[in-house]
Image: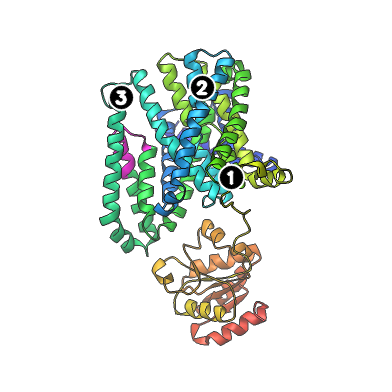
């Protein structure tokens, strides 16, 4: 036994998550569902893992950091593009889903309070699940991805109201004193204060700091996390949702230039914390209550998976969105929220529902989140299937519709490092009519490059994917950084992509050739013509 029990718990969580990922990979089970199953095995099935305050903290941090990354995606232009549509659709969807869900629960024999709480559980979708699925599918920037995020934000504001009200009914002593109305008013005042302070800092403090730190990706990462945790702590001090504080921090930073690298570097950290979150979610489920309430849970799950997506699809179509965008948004939001478990816990504490209600909500969560993890990545396949008939074409939406995603960058030349040699190579390839992507860690070096650019560190897998290196015709590293050049050569060799590397030191030639470099630029003084001749010998240039 270690002197720090949290290390034992984290070790179990990570071992269980890794083992389930390995087992589930041949079965094509999505990671989110694999994590929840791992939690079920470690928790209620074997009793190896007990939920603790430490695990709850890690789980909450995971969702908070996820909301920070979501905020980093939302510039004001993107918010304006779908703000009114998402607000109207999100508000209407919550009200109608709540009413229909409560009516269904009443038909299933639930008491009035339990039926009302069931309606609330059905009304809200999971930010953690949706953002993770959109990110894995590369759909965060799509029309349906941004609409989904917008509707989720509306839901998150409404869930603050519901949680505050239920917290007052449950007689919570933490936070502000007074009635639920007073508590809600103070919460909204605190939220406005956070936004004002963040906006002021984003206007006068952050731009100069970010501009100064831009050449240092590590420095920007640390400052970005410090900014996020400052708002998390401020939200906690004001008795607000820490997720809301993290989101506000992310949105403020999203208005600044050159924050893409911060978003990419934060992703692996978010993945770790979210793995803990989903395993803990599974470990906290009560299998006894789940077995006793499965018929009702199955009925409510079918409602969440069918009626809620259809309602969102219809609402967005009536608001002028295209059929594909409307349907994909509805499909994406077809699950219950992680906040549903908090709602259920507060309802039990307030004696509004019996204790086995938690097991009921847990089973609904397992079914709907698991189904979403399977369906959402296959959204475009479902769209193509429906388009064979007339179902989608009957929707009233007349607005511009999104196209099916292509493969993105393909058949292009990636030039890494915008030093003198890198700029010469970019200019020569452009003169030859090639499609070129210029990459550098310093966004300032990319400002006057007359082609598509990407600010990022090519040692990160996310940057390699974003640059389309697996589908490139040629990768050229003009850097004078030995380790990075060796890594670029190795990864390109493994991917089967032609790679040319700047061997700025002749002693590196043998090592780079052994690693897999197809061509070496021994010195920039060789001249761009000799480099071009080398590319012609590779068959890249005609």
Residue 506 among those drawn in magenta: no
- Indicate the secondary structure of the residue bearing disc 2: helix
Q: Is residue 541 shown above or below 416?
A: below
Asked if residue 49 shows in the view, the reply is: no
Residue 444 image-quadrant placement: bottom left
Q: Which residues are magenta?
A: 230-242
Q: Residues within 10 Å of mark 1 (few under 14, many from 20)?
A: many
The residue pinned by badge 1 equals 397
Residue 236 among those drawn in magenta: yes
Describe residue 306's horizontal placement relative to residue 336 as left or right. Answer: right
Q: Which of disc 1 and disc 3 is earlier in sequence?
A: 3
Describe residue 278's horizontal placement relative to residue 404 as left or right. Answer: left
Residue farthest to the right? 388
The residue pinned by badge 3 equals 181
Which residue is pictured at 54% across the width and 65% down the height? 487
Q: Label 1 vs label 2: CA separation?
A: 31 Å
Magenta stretch, main secondary structure class: helix
> In what quadrant of the picture does the N terminus appear?
top left
Which residue is pictured at 59% across the width and 83% down the height? 532
Residue 338 location (% of width, % of height): 48, 32
Question: Which of 223 and 67 lies nearest the eye of the viewer?
Answer: 67
Residue 379 location (% of width, % of height): 64, 44
The residue pinned by badge 2 equals 118
Which residue is pictured at 58% across the width and 46% down the height? 325
Q: Residues within 10 Å of mark 3 (few under 14, many from 20)?
A: few
- Indicate the secondary structure of the residue bearing disc 3: helix
């Amino acid at each position: 036994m270690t002197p720090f029990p949290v290390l034992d718990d984290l070790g179990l969580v990570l071992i269980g998550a890794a083992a389930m990922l390995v087992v589930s990979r041949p079965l094509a089970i999505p990671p989110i569902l694999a994590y929840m199953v791992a939690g079920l095995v470690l928790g209620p099935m074997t009793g190896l893992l007990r939920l603790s305050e430490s695990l709850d903290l890690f789980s909450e941090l995971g969702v908070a950091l996820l909301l920070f990354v979501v905020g980093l995606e939302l510039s004001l232009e993107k918010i304006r593009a779908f703000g009114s549509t998402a607000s109207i659709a999100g508000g209407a969807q919550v009200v109608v889903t709540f009413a229909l869900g409560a009516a269904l629960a009443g038909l299933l024999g639930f008491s009035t309070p339990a039926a009302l709480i069931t309606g609330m559980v059905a009304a809200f979708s999971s930010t953690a699940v949706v953002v993770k699925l959109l990110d894995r599918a590369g759909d965060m920037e799509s029309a349906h991805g941004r609409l989904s995020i917008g509707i989720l934000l509306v839901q998150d504001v409404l869930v603050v109201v519901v949680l505050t009200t239920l917290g007052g009914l449950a007689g919570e002593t933490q936070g502000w004193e007074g009635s639920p109305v007073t508590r809600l008013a103070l919460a909204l005042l605190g939220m406005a204060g956070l936004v004002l302070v963040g906006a002021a800092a984003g206007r006068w403090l952050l731009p100069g700091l970010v501009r100064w730190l831009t050449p240092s990706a590590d420095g920007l990462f640390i400052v970005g996390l410090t900014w996020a945790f400052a708002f998390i702590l401020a939200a906690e001090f004001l008795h607000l949702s820490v997720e809301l504080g993290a989101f506000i921090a992310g949105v403020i930073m999203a208005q600044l230039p050159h924050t893409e690298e911060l978003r990419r570097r934060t992703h692996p950290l978010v993945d770790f914390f979210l793995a803990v979150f989903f395993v803990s979610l599974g470990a906290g489920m009560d299998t006894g209550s789940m077995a006793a309430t499965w018929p009702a849970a199955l009925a409510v799950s079918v409602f969440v998976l069918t009626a809620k997506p259809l309602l969102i699809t219809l609402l967005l179509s009536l608001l002028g969105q295209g059929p594909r965008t409307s349907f994909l948004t509805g499909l994406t939001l077809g699950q219950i929220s992680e906040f549903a478990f908090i709602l259920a816990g507060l309802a039990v504490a307030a004696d509004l529902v019996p204790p086995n209600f938690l097991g009921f909500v847990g089973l609904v969560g397992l079914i709907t989140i698991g189904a979403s993890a399977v369906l959402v990545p296959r959204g475009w396949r479902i769209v193509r299937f429906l388009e064979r008939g007339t179902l989608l074409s009957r929707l009233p939406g007349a607005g511009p519709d999104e196209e099916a995603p292509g493969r993105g960058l393909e058949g292009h030349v990636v030039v890494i490092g915008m030093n003198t040699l890198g700029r010469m190579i970019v200019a020569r390839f452009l003169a030859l009519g090639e499609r070129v992507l210029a990459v550098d860690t310093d966004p300032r070096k990319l400002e006057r490059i007359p082609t598509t650019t990407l600010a990022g560190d090519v040692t990160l897998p996310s940057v390699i994917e974003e640059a389309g290196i697996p589908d490139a015709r040629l990768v050229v590293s003009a850097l004078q950084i030995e380790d990075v050049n060796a890594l670029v050569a190795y990864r390109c060799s493994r991917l089967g992509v032609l790679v040319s590397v700047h061997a700025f030191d002749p002693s590196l030639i043998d090592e780079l050739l052994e690693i897999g470099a197809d061509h070496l630029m021994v010195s920039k003084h060789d001249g761009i013509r000799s480099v071009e001749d080398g590319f012609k010998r590779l068959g890249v240039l005609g």
